[in-house]
Image (spheres, rainbow, N blue to C red):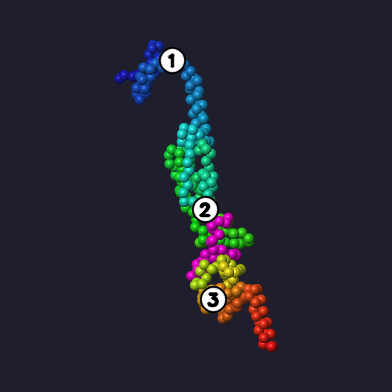
Amino acid sequence: MFALRSYRAVRAGEAGQVLPRWLRRPARIIQRLEIDRIEPPRFAATLASGLLFALAGLYGGIKGGHMDEALGAVTARAGFAIENVDVSGNRETSEIDVLQQIGLDGWTSMVGFDVRAARARIVGLPWVENAAVRKVYPATVEVRIEEREPFALWQRNGRVFVIERNGDVIAPFMGGHLASLPLVIGAGADVSGPEFIERVSRVRGLDGRVRAYVRLADRRWDLKLDNGMTIKLPEHGVQAALAEASRLDAEYALFSRTVSALDLRLPDRFFVALTPEAAEAREEALEKLMKGARI
């Protein structure tokens, strides 16, 4: 049976050591290579050192989490820098705010740009309900925005906010076209106001006439009409009181008269207050009437 012996031992005339069967084929290959006769190329040590440092730097970048930055810098300068941002769906959200949330610096790379992180920052803007961000190579980012729907203005403690139908605050009121929204005032008006506004809008004579819905002690409502008139509603039986106000206007054109207030807080009676001018005119008329009666 053939036994493979050490090549160096055979050349030296020594008996050598018998290798196990599974090492014999690799040993033959190594013997043929004659590694001790191979001469390394020039600068091999320098190249090996450079490779070692490169591998060490790569390992450090991966462990330190800086590979994305390095990759982004390289690819941006290779022609993959973000040049265009296409924003759509925004009405109240400015494009400048969106661009700030994306965080472009002029050399932001398409390759390293994180669309999920950008979307999370954009959704954090006050008016944004939802957003979709995607990359369109070679140099465009598309942003599609769904905004929250404003329903009313809520005033409390001297500050005014834009609110949704469910009462959630969207953002502080900054003027502009949103000034035409219904105005609710007072504590609790943000929550109960939207449903109450819809109830009043279905009352004949009041639709389009109310300029402010005032919540008092979070128990009852006053209505401020466009002519300055105040309708005081009860805590309970609001629908019946609204129907009575509609009847009085239809029968006496009450909302068009010089009336400053209509008090409907009592279920079996109502009170009417005249404006100061109307009250003064009424006093003068009564005085003239009394003088005529004495004559």
**The C terminus: image quadrant:** bottom right
For residue 163, side relative to residue 288 (left or right): left
Q: Position of residue 106 (x, y in %)?
A: 52, 38
- Check the image and report above or below for 231 versus 294: above
User: Element at badge 2?
Assistant: loop
Amino acid type shown at disc 1:
Glu
Residue 188 placement: quadrant: bottom right
User: As rendered, which of 51 and 113 lies closer to the eye?
Assistant: 113
The three-letter code of the residue at mark 2 reads Glu
- Secondary structure beneath label 3: loop
Disc assigned to residue 92: 2
What's drawn in magenta, residue-wise? 174-202
Q: Which residue is mark 3?
A: 253
Per the model, the C-alpha gap separating discs 2 and 1 is 74 Å
Give the residue number, with chain letter if any, for mark 1: 39
- The N terminus sits in image quarter: top left
